[in-house]
Structures are given as C-alpha cells and as structure tokens.
Amino acid sequence: MTELIKELMPQHVAIIMDGNGRWAKSRGVPRVAGHRAGMEAMKKIVDHSDKLGIKYLTVYAFSTENWKRSMEEVSGIFGLLVAFVKRDLKELIENNVRVEVLGDYSSIPEDARRSLQKTLDDTKADTGLQFNIALNYGARDEIRRSVEDIAAKVKAGQLEPEDVTEELIAEGLWTGKSHSYTPDPELIIRTSGEERLSNFLLWQGAYSEFVFTDVLWPDFTPEEYEKCIAEYQSRDRRFGGR
Ligand code: FPP
C-alpha cells in the first residue's frame, strides 16, 4: 500500500463516482450491472476511509440531473440503494458509521426512501466515519435553497441584508449546521478521466484539491484511493498548511 502521512490525512474526502456506464459497456452488460459493481467499490471505500481515519466521506450517488436517465436505470440505482442498506446496515452500525444524506430525498421511490430513513435513524448516534450520500443533489439548487431561507427571514424582518454573511449561506447548505454538519472537503476525487465538477459541492469546494484518475469507478480500489490521497498529500506539502 502507498505510504501515507497520518498528519496530512484529509478530514473530508468527496468523490464523484463516474464511469459505471462505460465499465458496463466494455463488458457488454446492462448499465445497472455497472452501478452494482460501483456499489461494491463504494462499500470498500467506505470501509477503507474509516481505516485511514478519514472523518467524512461524501459520494455523489445521484444528481438532480440523473432523473433524465431511463426509468430502468433510475429504478436500478435506487434498487441498489435498498440492497445496500439491507445487506450492510448492520455492519455500518458495528463500525460506528453515521450515514447522512445531502439532498432532498423526499421525492425518491418510496421503498428507497424508507430504507434510507431507517439507515439515518439507526446510525444517528454513531460517532465514527460520517458517510454522506449525495442523493438528488445539485449544488446550485442547494445554494438557491439556502438563499431562499435567508430571503424569507429578511422579508419577515428577522434579518437585515447586511447580516447575510458567507457563514450564514453555508449554514443553510446540506453540509451546513442546519443539516449534516460537514466541513468543506480538502480533497475531491473524480474517476473515469472526466475533469469536471458537474454541479457537485460548488460552494464547499472553493479551496479543495482535485485529483482525477482514469480508473472507472467499479475498478476503483482502496489501493487507487490511497494513490489519490498520496497525490493530495504531496500537493499539500508543497503549498504548506492551510
Ligand atoms: C456515474 O456513472 C454513476 C452514477 C450516476 C451512479 C452512482 C451509483 C452507484 C455507485 C451505486 C449506487 C449507490 C447508492 C448509494 C445509490 P455513469 O453512469 O455516469 O457512467 P458513464 O459516464 O460511464 O456512463
């Protein structure tokens, strides 16, 4: 395994899990099979984050734009979420992992919403790794929501316009104090050779380091993960502590 420096371990790593479709295509299997393999990769990265002492892991599981995909694929992804909870919830609890959702999941299919709610409730008191699943998440939408809340308070006379600080906007995001209480990510990883943010953590990523790898998400292993963290650590050492 890669030599990592404990003192330079990022507190929060966020991942854009990209390439499931291409992985499936290259094997001539349905796209959902790619997402299933992606889910297995995700599980290993959750476990490994915990081992490395990372405190927050955020994965981009479903964006506000992903609804445009075929019904079959969308229901396949949510089906995987249900399967993941069914199989792994016990282990998450044993490992003291707390699950949170970034995004408005009220509109996802009923069985997935129920499984997710159970996961959130059952892991609520856990104090280990915080595993954030970005689901029906869009960064512009979350900023808009926060600003809408603030505007309502200004209108109600509870706030003056000059009270609108960066901290206040951040508080109303899914990562903010009013939701999942997650610090900004030091590191954002995107797999599959794409080098875009795709409406992910636009506000929180203002100072993040980006690491891109050509590996398709289902092939992303703990070894690859460590390489990405090592790359981050080498940059951090060059530019000094933030
Ligand atoms: C991007 O690959 C991946 C997704 C949109 C879905 C990610 C979902 C999982 C890893 C599994 C489900 C896990 C949970 C928690 C619901 P892509 O389909 O855009 O790949 P492509 O660019 O190669 O087509």
Image: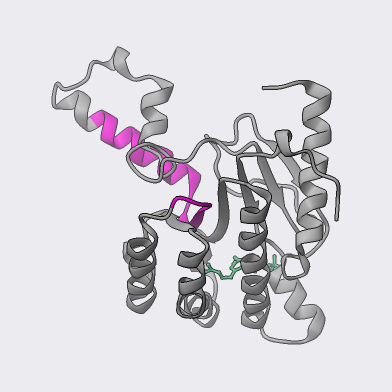
- Residue 80 percent across, percent down from the top left: 52, 78
- State whether residue 192 appears in this view: no
- Residue 227 percent across, percent down from the top left: 83, 50
Instruction: Check if residue 147 falls in the magenta segment.
Output: yes
Q: State whether residue 175 is above or below residue 27.
A: above
- Residue placed at 21% from the left, 32% from the top? 152
| Farthest residue, direction bottom | 29
Q: Where on the picture, by quarter, is residue 24?
A: bottom right
| Farthest residue, direction left | 156
- Residue 93 percent across, percent down from the top left: 45, 65
Q: Which quarter of the rendering shows the N terminus? A: bottom right
Nearest the viewer among 33 and 68 is 33
- Residue placed at 37% from the left, 61% from the top? 120
- Residue placed at 84% from the left, 34% from the top? 234
Nearest the viewer among 140 and 137 is 137
Stretch of the chain drawn in magenta: 127-151
Q: State whether residue 52 is above or below residue 75.
A: above
Which quadrant of the figure shows ligand 1?
Answer: bottom right
Direction from residue 108 to residue 153 in the image, left or right? left
Direction from residue 94 to residue 223 in the image, left or right? right
Direction from residue 149 to residue 119 in the image, left or right? right
- Residue placed at 34% from the left, 41% from the top? 145
Nearest the viewer among 88 and 79 is 88
- Residue 45 percent across, percent down from the top left: 66, 61
